[in-house]
DNA sequence: TATACGTGGTA
DNA sequence: TTACCAAGTAT
């Protein structure tokens, strides 16, 4: 049996019971989950996704909410610009697509914050269409099982898409199943750090196994520092703004970071990004 | 193509 | 404890 069939069979038995995979989840629910899951672990997304689906069950519901509410509901998920882009995407869907999330990859990619991965994930998981979904998990699985490498190298967008497309059966339902199964395999078995090859359904046909599990030789992706960076400072400032029901005085933000120059620069960048507003009285708040 | 962009769990 | 890692996107 070949790799696509093996992962599909495995997935049918071993899939995690994630809330956005339940029958009845709308494409809107899938879109929200994909935004939240960008660079963010499943465990942290689950409770927030449930809250959002209850509070904003349709795109137009989120579109009508003030940005401040959206950012507070986003909480500590990280990269709050995603929340803003999801809000903008909801507005676009409500206004230009009749409150229905598009199924077409090009229409999806035209939405704010929706890139190559998210567009295809919505097509596949929201609409059950044949659409090659390439995320970090899938790239790692393909690098190992197909190419026999220890890990995925730098992204090669076109080639990666073609690699995955070649694994998908011709029919929509079968292809969508392979897509979600490849992701799941990379997430829980073919992991970055300590792959559980003993539990892998593809073990017997894995090119990496057959090659003797050679070490990864390509360039190492350098991990981005965080302590002391603008990202940390912006996070501190956003934490202050989220935590206050009222606009905050400048002094409250000053207390969040000692380096005045860096702090001011970051505050300005938050305003530029639409994540914060300066009021006429000099106080600061989340955007209306 | 490389870099900026949050946060917290794990080894 | 430091370092890595987590369903990416925009510039």
Image: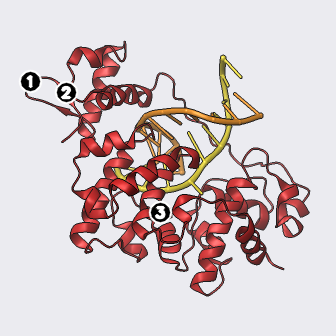
Chain colours: A red, B orange, C yellow
Query: Do labels 1 and 2 touch, CB within 8 Å?
Result: yes
Label at residue A281: 1
Query: Do labels 2 and 3 touch, CB within 8 Å?
Result: no
Chain for numbered disc 3 = A
Query: Do labels 3 and 1 touch, CB within 8 Å?
Result: no
Q: Earlier in the sequence, mark 2 or mark 3?
A: 3
For marks 2 and 3, give the one nearer the viewer: 2
Q: Earlier in the sequence, mark 1 or mark 2?
A: 2
Query: Please, which residue is most extreme toward the left here?
Result: A280
Is the residue marked by circle 1 packed among few (<14), some (14-19), or many (20+) residues within 10 Å? few
Q: Earlier in the sequence, mark 3 or mark 1?
A: 3
Question: Percent x, y for residue A33?
Answer: 47, 57
Query: Please, which residue is most extreme toward the front here?
Result: A54
- Is the residue at mark 2 from the same chain as the one at mark 3? yes
Q: Identify the residue position indicated by label 2 in the image.
A: A247
Chain for numbered disc 1 = A
Q: Is residue A47 left or right of residue A151?
A: left
Q: Identify the residue position indicated by label 3 in the image.
A: A118
Q: CA distance from mark 3 to mark 1?
A: 40 Å
Decide: is A96 above or below A86. below
Question: Percent x, y for residue A219?
Answer: 68, 45
Query: Please, which residue is most extreme toward the bottom here?
Result: A171
Q: Secondary structure at mark 3?
A: helix
């Amino acid at each position: 049996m070949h790799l696509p069939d093996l992962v599909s069979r495995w997935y049918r038995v071993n899939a995690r019971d994630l809330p956005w995979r339940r029958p009845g989840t709308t494409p809107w629910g899938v879109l929200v989950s994909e935004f939240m899951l960008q660079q963010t672990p499943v465990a942290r997304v689950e409770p927030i996704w449930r809250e959002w689906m209850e509070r904003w069950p349709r795109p137009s519901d989120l579109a009508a909410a003030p940005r401040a509410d959206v950012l507070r509901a986003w909480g500590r998920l990280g990269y709050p610009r995603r929340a803003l882009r999801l809000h903008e995407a909801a507005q676009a869907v409500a206004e230009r697509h009749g409150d229905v999330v598009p199924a077409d990859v090009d229409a999806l990619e035209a939405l704010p914050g929706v890139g190559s991965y998210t567009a295809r994930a919505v097509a596949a998981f929201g609409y059950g269409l044949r659409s090659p979904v390439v995320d970090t998990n899938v790239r790692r699985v393909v690098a190992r099982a197909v190419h026999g490498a220890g890990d995925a190298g730098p992204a090669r967008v076109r080639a990666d898409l073609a690699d995955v497309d070649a694994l998908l059966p011709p029919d929509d339902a079968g292809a969508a199943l392979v897509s979600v199964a490849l992701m799941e395999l990379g997430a829980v078995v073919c992991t970055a750090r300590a792959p559980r090859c003993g539990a892998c359904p593809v073990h017997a046909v894995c090119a990496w196994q057959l090659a003797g599990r050679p070490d990864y030789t390509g360039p190492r992706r350098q991990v981005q520092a965080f302590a002391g960076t603008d990202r940390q400072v912006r996070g501190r400032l956003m934490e202050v703004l989220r935590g206050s029901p009222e606009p905050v005085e400048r002094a409250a933000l000053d207390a969040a970071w000692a380096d005045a120059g860096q702090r001011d620069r970051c505050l300005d960048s938050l305003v530029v990004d639409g994540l914060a507003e300066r009021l006429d009285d000099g106080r600061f708040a989340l955007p209306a």
